[in-house]
Image (spheres, rainbow, N blue to C red):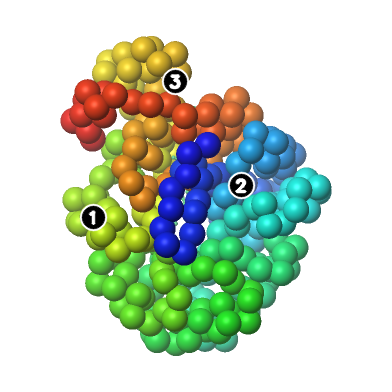
Amino acid sequence: MKFDTIPSLTLPKIGFGTWKIGGGSFPDPKVDTVSTAALHSAIKVGYTHFDTAEMYAAGHAEELLGQAVASSQIKREAFFITSKVMPAHLEYDQVIQSCEKSLQRLQTEYIDLYLIHWPASDMKLVETFRALNKLVKDGKVKHLGVSNFNLKLLKQSQQLSETPIVTNQVPYSLNDRSYVKNGMLEYCQQNDIFFTAYSPVDEGKLRSTKTLEEIAKAHHVTSYQIVLAWVISHPRIITIPMSANPSHIQENFEAAEIELTKTELDMLEKLA
Ligand SMILES: NC(=O)c1ccc[n+]([C@@H]2O[C@H](COP(=O)([O-])OP(=O)(O)OC[C@H]3O[C@@H](n4cnc5c(N)ncnc54)[C@H](OP(=O)(O)O)[C@@H]3O)[C@@H](O)[C@H]2O)c1
């Protein structure tokens, strides 16, 4: 695995997403077996960064992740767990309560990285950060970040947070470069903030092209792996693909090792 570093943190370039683990918007017992197997498989392959949220399967993704980590017999400190507070819970007391519930579901005493999942139109960021700063002071959260924030809100968050904002988690794939075009990537790179790319393989709907297939063939890997290698090729970009398929879970992890040439990167950049 390759890693990337900002002054306060080093993270693996590729982590594991958990949207659809344990269900979609609500828990779905029918997918528990597959979801648990996927988490065990990811831990076995060597993923250490797991991305979840109170919103995923209404908390059930956190529950299954907590169970998988607890039963892995690997010490808690070896994992890096990101979770998120939802936009409907951004008042002071709600943030504190949401975090407590996430800690219980995750069976842990601390969350490594806690994000505001989405901005809410009526949020009072001062109050939200008063709660987030308290969670850090109390040792319940190690690092703070945001998700789906524009530059103005990210800069406000940096002013209000008593510890560095370590990430903005945003969509980024061959099909979606909106947060590059709006200057977010450049700002993150210049200000020591991880740009965490979500939905890096377009939620599994990757559009195959001749260029992609030719580059994949030259490296004896799949088009999905090439896209992941391209996503993480820039400094400060890390990513968190999700998969419930053990072969894909392994392939995605190994994609971090692919070395694309300058010519290949230029060709992929043109596809984007
Ligand atoms: N902050 C936010 O607002 C936000 C929003 C969306 C997502 N996220 C986070 O980012 C994570 C990733 O995003 P995502 O789940 O939306 O989309 P994604 O990772 O781009 O795509 C996941 C889909 O791609 C398929 N897939 C993955 N690897 C593959 C491979 N090697 N070959 C073929 N198919 C593959 C999976 O199917 P199989 O199961 O069949 O492999 C799954 O259906 C989420 O799980 C979540 O943790 C955050």
Q: Which residue is mark 1?
A: 186
Q: What secondary structure is marked by label 3? A: loop
Q: Residue at x 66, y 68 (%)?
A: 110
Q: Which residue is mark 2?
A: 48
Instruction: Measure the C-alpha gap from mark 3 to mark 1.
Output: 29 Å
Q: Amino acid at mark 1?
A: Glu
Q: Amino acid at mark 2?
A: Thr
Up-down: is 185 above or below 272? below
- Closer to viewer: mark 2 or mark 3: 2
Up-down: is 93 above or below 14? below
Q: What secondary structure is marked by label 2? A: loop
Circle 1 crowding by C-alpha within 10 Å: few under 14, some 14–19, many from 20: some
Could you tell me if residue 209 is visible in this image? Answer: no
Image quadrant of residue 194? bottom left
User: What x and y, as percent, mark residue 31?
Assistant: 68, 41
Instruction: Measure the C-alpha gap from mark 2 to mark 1.
Output: 27 Å
Q: Amino acid at mark 3?
A: Thr
Instruction: Measure the C-alpha gap from mark 2 to mark 3.
Output: 23 Å
Q: What secondary structure is marked by label 1? A: helix
Question: Of marks 2 and 1, which one's residue comes earlier in the chain?
Answer: 2
Q: Residue at x 42, y 71 (%)?
A: 164
- Closer to viewer: mark 3 or mark 1: 1
User: What x and y, as percent, mark residue 57?
Assistant: 61, 55
Mark 3 lies within 8 Å of ligand 1 (Cβ measured):
yes
Could you tell whether 229 is left or right of 82 in the image? Answer: left
User: What x and y, as percent, mark residue 249?
Assistant: 58, 32
Q: How many marks?
A: 3
Q: Which residue is mark 3?
A: 222
Could you tell whether 143 is left or right of 174 in the image? Answer: right
